[in-house]
Image (cartoon, rainbow, N blue to C red):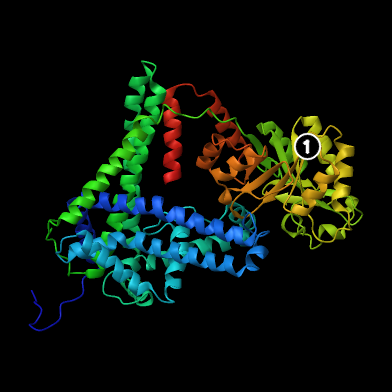
Amino acid sequence: MQSTPAGTPAAPPTAWRSVRTAAGAAWYLLRRRILLILVVSISTQGLYVWIIVPLLLTLFQGALDLAGVDGLSVAGLPGILRSPLALLVLVLLAVVATFFVLIEISMFSVVAHVCFRGEAPTATAIVRGLGQLAHRAASWQVLLFAGYALLVLPLSHIGVGASVTSHIAIPEFISGELTKTALGAWTYLVVILALMYLALRLTATAAALTGDEESVLTAMRRSVALTRRPQALLFLVLLVVGLVAGAIFVVAALLGTIPVAIAASSGAGDPVAGSVLALLDLVRFIVTGLVAAFISFFFVALYRGHAVSRVVAPVRDRLSRTISVVLLVVFGLLGAPTIAFAGIASAAPAAPPLIIAHRGYTAGGVENTIPALRAAADAGADIAEMDIQETADQGFVVIHDVGLRRLAGDPRSVYELDEAEATRIVVRDDDHESTIPSLEEYIRTADELGIRVLVEVKPHGHEAPGLAGRVVDVMNALDPDHRHLIQSLDAGIVDDIRAADPERTTVLVTGFQIGNAPRTSADGVAIEDWSYSDEMLVRLHDESKTLFVWTVNDSALLAAYAGSGVDGIITDSVTEAVTLRQVQQEIDDPVTDYLFTATRTIALYE
């Protein structure tokens, strides 16, 4: 057996050994510092809820007020760009958000470095580490970190995320439209895989920046170098951690059925179910904190290599102990009443929403065609949403795209054809085939089927003046009883239709809106799922306006919106949405209701 000659450098550890050693060190520190992890999680979330969120909301509302707009949207963007003060406030908001995200996703990395050096993780030591972190990030390179933390992390779901970015995602209407074509689907897949790969290579950035690296750029370079060899192993570690966390949550949810079932036998099932669901949220909070801590500890251990001390230094200073006790007591005082009374002060059940079939039901026909309309009616949809465009002879046909290439393979556009020509064109999608219907054919068929129609007016820019008036005239001729609705992304068209025909129900479609619901003369607003907020719903209902949310296809989101109080859900998954709404209306058993809600919570968590 050969031995390494004296003075010869030892071979670097293999990727497997490095990952295994780092995982062992992280697990050891996790077990020995669980109370500290809970205290750090409470303090971080307390900072977020009580200071950061109010500050960000105040800054954002201030920027909107300075610009004189209702929200950050395509329509409101010109007003914001014209106001230097509004732009300055938004920049300040971005800086505050970025530095809080920096602190939140790096907090456990600071703790890990302190502990792995063999020091006691006192409040002073942690604050000192966070101060060094902020100093290193305080340069133009913070823009690099902002791109990573505010976009790459939340879009890839790889690494330790932040509360501020929990809502950041690719909107369904963008991904849905992209994946309707082979090229778009492949492009979307490549982008997602690229984001995941980039996130994986940058997962050690926080560990490096809270370690010995002096800038964001050098920390990112160190992360890329550190993750060069063990990429598959790192992905496996993150996957296993996620699966374990999910399993813990599922087990906790199943155990919750026991007290609910016992209480249901004596008629107290509903309040107990509410309390158990509140406890489930507490479990989610704790598990999320443990996951974030383990991942941070793991990458710090991987970064430090052999310079990892397993000495557990006790925390003896009075300040740290006092802070810990106060935080735990406050957490208990705030959490206990929530759990105890969660099922007592419940609001009245929300009215079931309308199920609106997006471009008909495409499981039964090509979008915006008569077969898709029939499929929507057969599936139980209340309304079929569709799109109309004006032809060269001022007729109206039902089609979404201005160009005919995607569905018909035809290089022409709608505005080049008259109505008779357009309605002879065959459109195909998957195994379905049909022709483009006229507005008249579509409305008459809908009346025969007994389903209402939400007509979306889509201007292509080649119409003659007076488009809104022509739409009103045609709709009044086809639908004198005003059963059907009209919507548009164009606020001017909506206002013109509303002014010309006040009896017609109108809806303003908004694709991107951060802040308040848009002010409109319309009877309601259709908001994209990504932009929806409960505050919008409350404001619109206070103004006696309706709110539709689009396009919702995820099962958990469908279930959540079905009980949220929104007035309508625009979806491609019509059968599933109708079934979920029916199930929610028919559930009267506390155990079943609890399991249904818990399942939805688990799905949203994962």
- Rendered location of residue 333, percent (x, y): 30, 38
Q: Quadrant of the rendered structure where residue 229 is?
A: bottom left
For label 1, the crowd category at 10 Å Cα-Cα, with few meaning under 14, some 14 to 19 and many 20 or more, is: many
Say what amino acid the circle numbered 1 marks.
His
Which residue occupies 37% across, 74% down? 216
Q: Is residue 515 above or below residue 524?
A: below
**Closer to us: 45 or 278:** 45
**Closer to us: 445 or 405:** 445
- Rendered location of residue 134, percent (x, y): 34, 69
Residue 359 visible in rendering: yes
**Closer to us: 214 or 68:** 68
Q: Quadrant of the rendered structure where residue 149 is?
A: bottom left
Which residue occupies 20% across, 51% down? 322
- Residue at far top of view: 266
Q: Secondary structure at mark 1?
A: loop
Q: Is 73 positioned to the left or the right of 320 in the image?
A: right
Count of numbered circles in the view: 1
- Rendered location of residue 91, percent (x, y): 51, 67
- Residue at far right of view: 393
Q: Is 73 positioned to the left or the right of 337 in the image?
A: right
Which residue occupies 31% across, 35% down? 336
**Closer to us: 466 or 360:** 466
Q: Mark 1 highlights which residue? A: 484
- Rendered location of residue 465, percent (x, y): 89, 57
Quarter of the picture holding the N terminus: bottom left
Q: Quadrant of the rendered structure where residue 553 is?
A: top right
Residue 227 visible in rendering: no
